[in-house]
Amino acid sequence: MVVAKSRRSNAAIKVETTEIDQVGALLADLPEREKTEVPLRDAIEELQDSLRASLNKGYSYEEITKILNDSGIAISASTLKRYLSIVQKKPATGGKTRAKRTPKS
């Protein structure tokens, strides 16, 4: 037989304003955490100059991929090629730029 437990609604729970202030101050004082991992695309973006230099030296995407995989960066040749083309298209300002429209006279 299943017995239903009565649960209080979260809206019914009250929090002291002093607790909010204390926790807010505690959170504000937390130090920055150093990133120990980044997304694969970001890693390729950081390595793009070295990767492009290797391609210019005559190495293939497959050869570079083997080096990356042996170094702990798991990626396929097709993904490497795609990510390099994506980061190459990014504007240097970090945001999208659009041409301004000029009103017709």
Image: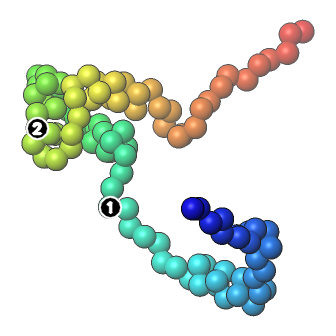
At mark 2, the secondary structure is helix
Rendering coords of residue 29 (x, y %): 56, 82
Rendering coords of residue 90 (x, y %): 47, 32
Looking at the image, can residue 88 be seen?
no
Of the numbered discs in the image, which one, if any, rests on residue 101?
none
Tell me if mark 1 has few (under 14), some (14-19) or many (20+) residues whose alpha carbon lies within 10 angstroms of its own.
Answer: few
- Looking at the image, which residue is at 23% across and 34% down? 75
Name the residue tied to disc 1.
36
Q: Kindly report the distance in space between the C-alpha atoms of the residues bearing marks 1 and 2.
A: 21 Å
- Looking at the image, which residue is at 57% across and 62% down? 1
Q: Amino acid at mark 1?
A: Thr
- Looking at the image, which residue is at 27% across and 42% down? 47
Q: Amino acid at mark 2?
A: Ile
Q: Quadrant of residue 55?
A: top left
Tell me if mark 2 has few (under 14), some (14-19) or many (20+) residues whose alpha carbon lies within 10 angstroms of its own.
Answer: few
At mark 1, the secondary structure is loop
Looking at the image, can residue 69 be seen?
yes
